[in-house]
Image: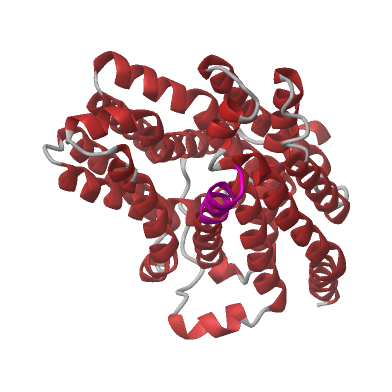
Amino acid sequence: MKKKEQGLSLREWLSLAGLTCAAFVFNTSEFSPIGLLTDIAHDFGKTEAGAGLLISVYAWVVTVLSLPLMLLVSRMDLRRLLLWVVALFAAFQCVSWLSSSFAMLMMSRIGVACTHSIFWSIVAPIAVRVVPDRCRSLALGTVVTGSSLAIILGLPLGRVIGLQVGWRITFLCIGAVALLTLIWLMLSLPALPSRGRFSVRKLPQLFGNSTLAGLYLFTFLVATAYYTCYSYIEPFFKQVAGMSDQIVTAALIFFGCAGLVGSMLFSKFYMLNRYRFMGCVLVVLSCSLLLLQPLSFGVVPSIVLCLFWGTCVTAYNVSMQSEIISLSPPEATAVSMSIFSGIFNLGIGCGALAGGFVCSHSSIAYIGFAGGLIALGALAYWLFRLKHLVRASYDAGRSR
C-alpha cells in the first residue's frame, strides 16, 4: 500500500508523457532551422547570414514577448491555455510549410516564437500541478527529458527529412506531431484553473523579491557563460580540435544524451541537498568550459568533456525552474517562469555576442576561457550571496 502511495496514477503518467512530447516538439521546432539554413537560404536567394535571421529574430521575440504575453493570458485556465498554444503552434508550422517567400516564413517563425514564449512559461507549472508535491522533481525531470530528446533525435531527424524531401516537409512533420500531441493532451490533462490574475501592478513586488531577482541574475550569468561557448562549438571542434563533420555531429549527439543524465541526477539528488547540488553543478560546468581548449588535442577527451558539460547545463536548467516555481507566489508562477524564459534567451543573445567578440578580436580557441570566467563569476555569486538568500527564503516559509 505504501508503495502505491509513492507512485503516480496512470492519468498522471499520461499527462506527464503528453507534456514531455510537447516539450520535444517545441524544442525540435526551435532547433530545426539550424540544420536547414543552407537549403532555406538557397530557395529564397538569401545568404546564410541573411537566413540566420530566422534564428536570431526568434530568440529576440521570445526575450521581448515572454512577459507581456504571459500577463495577457494569466487569467486563463492553464489546461485551456496550453491546448490553444499547441494548436496555434501547429497552425504556424503549416504556414511555414506553405511559405512562398522569406517574409512569409519569417512571419510564421515569429508566430511560433510567440507560442514558444507562452509554452515555456506554463509547462513547468503545469507539470508540478498534475502530480503530488512529493513527485515535483520527477515531473520537472521528465519534461526536461523531452528537451534533451529534441537535441538527440529531433534536430538530426529534421535535418534528414529536410535533405531527403525538402525543408518544408520538416515543418509539416513538426505540425503533424504537434496535432497528435494536442489530441493526447486533450484526453489526459485535468482541469487546471488559474490561481488568480497577475497584473502589471504586481510586477514591482515580484522584482522586489531579492531571492527571485538574484535567481534571474544568476540565470543570465549561466546562460551567457554557456552560449559564449556553445554558439561556436561546431567551428571550434572543426578548427581547433580538428574533428570531421561526422565526429562533430557525434559529439553534439553525446552532448544531448548527457542532458538525460542531468535530468536523472536532478530527480535523484536535488531534493537531498539543493545547495550542494547546485554548487557541484557550477563547479563542474566552470571546469568543463575552462578545459575546452586544453583538452581539444583529442576526440575522446573532447567528447568526455561534452558529456560533463551537457549534464551540468540540463541539471542547472531544471534546478532553476524548480527554485523559481517554489519561491514564487502561487498566482505568479507562470509569470515568473516567463521572466526566466526571457532572461535565459537574453543570456543566449549576450553569450553569442561575447563569443563572437572573442572570435573576432582574439581566437576561437579561447571561447572556453571566456565562458569559464563568466561561469566562475556565477559560482562565486551562488556561494557567497544567492545560496544564503535562497536558504533564508525557505526558512522564512517554514516558520510561517
Q: Quadrant of residue 293?
A: top right
Q: Residue 294, relative to residue 107: is it above or below?
A: above
**Direction left: furthest residue:** 100
Give the residue at x 44% y 56%.
78
> Camera-side residue: 382 or 318?
382
Q: Is residue 353 magenta?
A: yes
Q: Residue 243, relative to residue 94: is it above or below?
A: above
Q: Residue 240, relative to residue 19: is it above or below?
A: above
**Residue 360 image position (x, y, % from top left):** 53, 50
Q: Quadrant of residue 213?
A: bottom right
Quarter in which the C terminus is drawn: bottom right
> Camera-side residue: 382 or 188?
382
**Residue 97 image position (x, y, % from top left):** 20, 33
Q: Which residues are magenta?
A: 352-363
**Residue 242 image position (x, y, % from top left):** 62, 22
State whether the magenta stretch is mostly helix, strand or loop: helix
Residue 329 relative to residue 167: left or right: right
Give the residue at x 38% y 23%.
159
Residue 12 relative to residue 315: left or right: left
**Residue 252 image position (x, y, % from top left):** 58, 27
Residue 162 seen from this side:
yes
Residue 80 seen from this side:
no
Q: Residue 243, relative to residue 126: is it above or below?
A: above
